[in-house]
Image (cartoon, grey):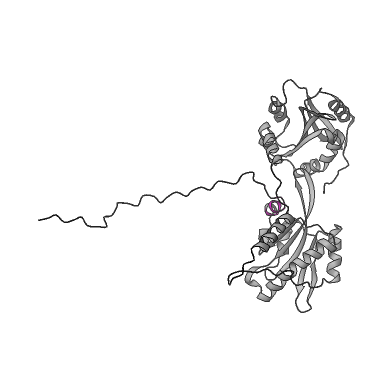
Amino acid sequence: MSHQTGIQAGNDVKDVFASARSGDQYRVLKIVIDGEQLMMDTTRKAAKKWDQEYDSLVLPLLEDDVPCYVLYRLDSTNSQGYEWVFLAWSPDISIVRHKMLYAATRATVKKEFGGGHIKDEMFGTAKDEMTLLGYRKYLTLQAAPLPLTAAEEELRKIKLNEVHTDISVDTKQQTLQGVAFPVHKDAIAALERFRDKRVNYVQLEVDAEQELIRLCNTEPTELKDLPLRIPKESPRYHFFLYKHSHEGDYLQSTVFIYSMPGYNCSIRERMLYSSCKNPLVDMVENTLQIEIEKKLEIDDGDELTGDFLYEEVHPKQHAHKQAFAKPKGPGKRGVRRITRPPAEEED
């Protein structure tokens, strides 16, 4: 969910936005945050067709270590007037506080300008992403079929399993529903606080003797602390509120982590935690109405790095699969051996 900062547009920005929406006076606008306001940094007029001057006008506006917003006017129109491309520039080496501030104010800029005039929106951390070629690659990706959501992918797998029902000695069959142990009232209360964002981490355990899922931990947990919360000797269920920035938006994503430290656990523990997992997740999503963006299964807390979580929550989509590279044959094998003696000469 995007977070607003309360920063508003200054009068100079509102005046230029009004002129830009109503005609072709401007080709490109650069907007920055100065103090507590959006300010107009640079404006440029059109001299050529939009694609002939895109790189020469846009790239000089992008500083190496300072975020900004850029609005670039296309030559196409819709019912409201000329169409614009909205560029959110946030270089990797800029100060984290600045990146978060610009990410959280992005929606305000679009609202002030008028979303109906914005045809495309791009976010970039490297200049090659903001070039004309980068914009055209973005358009190609936007036109590609959308990837399946996690729910759609799961449904596809279920349908495949329904079709391929052959059973043999080597076939592994899934249980239908698992074991639905009741959840202790303290655990329910902790999950409700988590839903309401009053805590950012909840850890649960299976009490095999009482056949109950109990609360273990609700300590405030930052990303750097998360690996330390994963026990080395016993399984656990974890709910973590992953706070991060993605494509210019500040997000708070719920991640469910099922930690199972391999064969350090007994067979009974592994079976119980595996069987209780799906009913627990169903209860959390359907009864408590907690939307889980990503479900993970790990065997070691050291896996939970910032890069790992980001790539799991926001997997990269590849437009083309890499072609299979045929491996090279073996090198020279030395002098060729004679395996059959030559025919003897006749006397």
Is 216 situated above or below 85?
below
| Front in this rendered view, residue 319 or 236 | 319
Q: Where is residue 43 in the image (x, y as percent from the top left)?
A: 79, 25
| Front in this rendered view, residue 339 or 133 | 339
* Outermost bottom residue: 209
Position of residue 289 in the picture relative to residue 247 (left or right):
right
Position of residue 162 in the picture relative to residue 221 (left or right):
left
* Outermost top residue: 47
Is 238 situated above or below 210?
above
Q: Position of residue 38 (x, y in %)?
A: 85, 34
The answer to if 340 sits in the magenta stretch is: no
At 55% across and 46% down in the image, what residue appears? 323
Image quadrant containing the C terminus: bottom left
* Region in magenta: 308-319
| Front in this rendered view, residue 155 or 332 | 155
- Quadrant of residue 37 in the image? top right
At 79% across and 27% down in the image, what residue appears? 42
- Quadrant of residue 75 in the image? top right
Task: Specify whether residue 70 is in view.
Answer: no
